[in-house]
Amino acid sequence: MAKITFLPSKKTLNVEPKTNLMNAIIEAQLPIGSSCGGEGICAKCIVKVIKGNENLSKPNANEKKLIQREKLNPTTRVSCQIKVLGDVEITTGYW
Ligand code: FES
């Protein structure tokens, strides 16, 4: 299992490796922005990775496009486009 810690509350959720991060956030009953329904278009579902970026899947083509368009830094990830592979700590500006 992979442990996701949501900051600042420190709420945690254990998920199967390869779980989609946005789905995990929804499962944890935390709010997450989205206007494209997880299609990798809106970039509203971005999260900041505090620890464990190496435990998230590498950016796919959709995420690479959004990184360029939105000028995201490497610790800001598009949650609907990535899989959790190991322990991570994440936050947003509205949790
Ligand atoms: S929900 Fe739109 S890019 Fe993730």
Image (tube, rainbow, N blue to C red):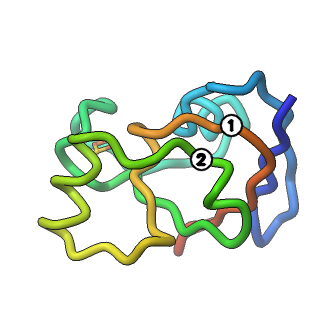
In depth, the one of 64 and 23 nearer the eye is 64
- The spot of residue 66 in percent (x, y) is 21, 56
**CB at mark 1 closer than 8 A to ligand 1?**
no
Q: Is residue 1 left or right of residue 74?
A: right
Q: Residue at x 87, y 62 (%)?
A: 10
| Residue where numbered disc 2 is placed | 56
Mark 2: secondary structure: loop
Three-letter code for the amino acid on which mark 2 is drawn:
Leu
Quarter of the figure that contains the N terminus? top right
Q: Residue at x 62, y 60 (%)?
A: 53
Q: Is residue 3 left or right of residue 89?
A: right
Whichever of callouts 1 and 2 sits on the residue coming sooner in the sequence is 2
Indicate which quadrant contains ligand 1. top left
Q: Quadrant of residue 94?
A: bottom right
Q: Quadrant of residue 3?
A: top right
| Residue where numbered disc 1 is placed | 85
Give the alpha-carbon distance from disc 1 to disc 2, as whole Å: 5 Å
Report if the CB atoms under discs 1 and 2 are less than 8 Å apart: yes
Residue 94's place in the image compared with 15, above or below, is below
Mark 1: secondary structure: loop
- The spot of residue 78 in percent (x, y) is 39, 52
Q: Which label number is shown at residue 31? A: none
Residue 20's place in the image compared with 12, above or below, is above
Q: Residue at x 25, y 31 (%)?
A: 39
